[in-house]
């Protein structure tokens, strides 16, 4: 089953320490276990655009949909055996310490 890991900033988390950032080890372990589908960093929230259509009118606004101190900094899609494996991999991500990781199962169309 596929899981989306939203990698988020969190101002209440531990202070980021580059020497404790083991993201290359985390990615390598996912690759070794054949779990990685895709993942990447995202540009900052101020570079986002929000798109809506209301009464047939296109509305594009600068910035994210919601203004919060937290923002989505990146994402990973993993193919895991089950939720337990997805949570185990999320807990091993460095941003589980320096931010937070939201885990969401995919909901395939037609199911």
Image: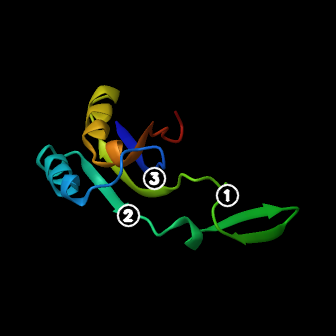
- Mark 3 or mark 1, which has the lower sequence index? 3
What residue sits right under mark 1 in the picture? 65
Q: How crowded is mark 2: few (under 14 residues within 10 Å), some or many (20 or more)?
A: few
- Residue drawn at 45 percent across, 52 percent down: 9
Structural distance between the alpha carbons of marks 2 and 3: 12 Å
Q: Position of residue 32 (x, y in %)?
A: 11, 48
Q: How crowded is mark 3: few (under 14 residues within 10 Å), some or many (20 or more)?
A: some
- Residue drawn at 67 percent across, 57 percent down: 65
Q: Nearer the viewer, residue 94 or 51?
A: 94
Structural distance between the alpha carbons of marks 2 and 1: 19 Å
Residue at the front extreme, as displayed: 15
- Mark 2 or mark 3, which has the lower sequence index? 3
Structural distance between the alpha carbons of marks 3 and 1: 16 Å
What residue sits right under mark 2 in the picture? 41
Q: Where is residue 100 in the image (x, y as percent from the top left)?
A: 41, 43
Q: Quadrant of residue 63?
A: bottom right
Quadrant for the N terminus in the image: top left
Q: How crowded is mark 1: few (under 14 residues within 10 Å), some or many (20 or more)?
A: few
Q: Position of residue 3 (x, y in %)?
A: 38, 41
Q: Quadrant of residue 39?
A: bottom left
Q: For marks 3 and 1, give the one nearer the viewer.
A: 3
Say what secondary structure mark 2 lies in. strand
Q: Position of residue 107 (x, y in %)?
A: 49, 38
What residue sits right under mark 3 in the picture? 9
Q: Which of 67 and 87 is in front in this view?
A: 67
Q: Which of 48 and 37 is in front in this view?
A: 48
- Mark 2 or mark 1, which has the lower sequence index? 2
């Amino acid at each position: 089953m596929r899981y989306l890991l939203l990698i988020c900033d969190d101002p209440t988390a531990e202070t980021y320490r580059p020497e404790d950032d083991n993201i290359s080890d985390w990615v390598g372990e996912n690759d070794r276990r054949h779990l990685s589908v895709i993942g990447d960093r995202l540009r900052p929230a101020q570079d986002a655009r929000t798109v809506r259509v209301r009464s047939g009118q296109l509305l594009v606004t600068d910035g994210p949909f919601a203004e919060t101190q937290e923002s989505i900094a990146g994402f990973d899609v993993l193919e895991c055996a089950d939720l337990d494996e997805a949570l185990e991999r999320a807990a091993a991500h460095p941003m589980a310490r320096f931010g937070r990781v939201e885990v969401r199962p995919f909901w395939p169309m037609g199911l």
